[in-house]
Amino acid sequence: MEMLQDSFGRIHDYLRISVTDRCNLRCVYCMPAEGMVFQPHEEIMSYEEIAEVAAALAPIGLRKIRLTGGEPLVRKDLEQLISMLSRIEGIEDISLTTNGIFLPKKAALLKEAGLNRINISLDSLHKDRYALITRGGDVSKVLEGITAAEEAGLDPIKLNVVLMKGSNDDEIQDFIAMTLDRPIHVRFIEYMPIGSATDSWRKSYLPLEAVMEVCQAAGWETEAASQLKGNGPSQNMRVKGAAGTFGLIHPVSDHFCDNCNRLRLTADGHIKSCLYWSEEFNVRKVTGKNDPDAIRSMFINSLGTKPKNHEMALALEKKEQSNTPTSRRMSQIGG
C-alpha cells in the first residue's frame, strides 16, 4: 500500500486537524478584530468524518494527530472525538493546541478520553498586555489552565509564544524563568505572514536570535535539550539545571521544510500539504461513502503537489514568490 510520501521523499506521519474556525479570542496574529466570516455549521466536518479520515490514513503511516482550531475547546464535547481517535489502530499520539481558557473544566476529561499532551498559546504574562494581544482575554484563566493540565497528567505541556517586536519581546526572560523550577516547555515562535504579508507584520517580525541574546544578558548558561515527545521543528534548549526547556521555532528566518512531516485538514474538510501555500483538496467529496481508498488517494495526490519549501522569507523581503500564498487566516487553517 502506498505510504504518505511526497515527491521529495519526505514521510508524513502527522496530521493537524482543525475542528472549528471559531474562537473565544481574537489574537492579533490570528484573525482581524472584525469582519471574519465563519463557516456555517453544516460545512464543518463531523466527528464521524474526522475519525473516518484518520482511520483511512492509519494503515498508510499516520501515527500522530493534533487537534486545533480556531479554539478547539469551543467545539462541543471534544472529548468524544478524542475517544474515537484513540481507538484507531496505529494512532500513537493525540495532542491539542488550545488557548487554555477552558482547560480548568476540561483537562481531566480530555486526558481520560485519550489526550496525551497539550500546547497552550500564551503570548504575555501581563494582564493588560494579554488582553490587548488577544483582544479581551483573561491571562489568569490561562494560568489556571496550565495548572489543570499539570494536575491531569498531560505531558509534556508546551507554551506557545509568538514573539512580536515591540509587543512582547521584553517578556522573553520571564517566560524562560517559568522553566527553571517547573517541567514547562516554552516554545518561541516567529510571527508568520499567514493570510496577510503586510507592512504591519514586517514591523512586528522578530528573528529568534533575540532569545539567545536575552539568555546571555541574564547570565544563563544554556545547553541543547533532549528531544521532547512530538517535538516537531523546535530547536530545544535548556538553562543548565532547569526543570523545563525552551524551544525556538523559526519558520521565516530558518525554515525547516526539509524535515516536514505534517499534513493539515481544515475544519471545512480541505487538505493542505503546506501551511503557507494556497493549494487545497476537498476530502469531503469522498467521506461518508465507506471508501477509505478514495480518502487515501486524495491525501496522496495532495502530497504529489507539495512544494519543496515555503517562501516566507521572500515575503519578508517583498520579493516575488513561486506560488500563491494562502488567503486563509491562521484560525481558518489550524496552524
Image (cartoon, rainbow, N blue to C red):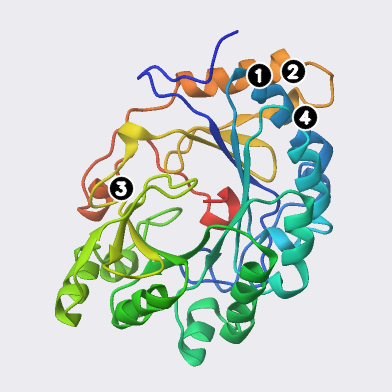
Q: Secondary structure at mark 4?
A: helix
Q: Which residue is mark 1?
A: 59
Quarter residue 1 falls in: top right
Quarter residue 23 falls in: bottom right
Q: Amino acid at mark 4?
A: Glu
From the top left corner, tell me how far across and down residue 18 is, in percent.
64, 48
Instruction: Compare marks 1 and 4 and give the one earlier in the sequence.
Output: 4
Q: Which residue is mark 4?
A: 52
- Real-space Cα distance between discs 3 and 1? 33 Å
Is residue 28 toward the left or the right of residue 294 in the image? Answer: left
Looking at the image, which residue sits at the far front? Answer: 241
From the top left corner, tell me how far across and down residue 215 is, in percent.
21, 74
Residue at 78% across / 55% down in the picture?
112
Quarter residue 135 falls in: bottom right
Instruction: Compare marks 4 and 3 and give the one earlier in the sequence.
Output: 4
Determine contact: label 4, label 3, CB under 8 Å. no
- Real-space Cα distance between discs 3 and 2? 34 Å
Q: Which residue is mark 3?
A: 312
From the top left corner, tell me how far across and down residue 228 is, in percent.
44, 50
Q: Which residue is mark 2?
A: 292
Mark nearest the camera among 3 and 2 is 2
Determine contact: label 1, label 4, CB under 8 Å. no
What is the tally of numbered marks visible in this picture?
A: 4
Mark nearest the camera among 1 and 4 is 1
Q: Amino acid at mark 3?
A: Met
Determine contact: label 1, label 2, CB under 8 Å. yes
Q: Secondary structure at mark 3?
A: helix
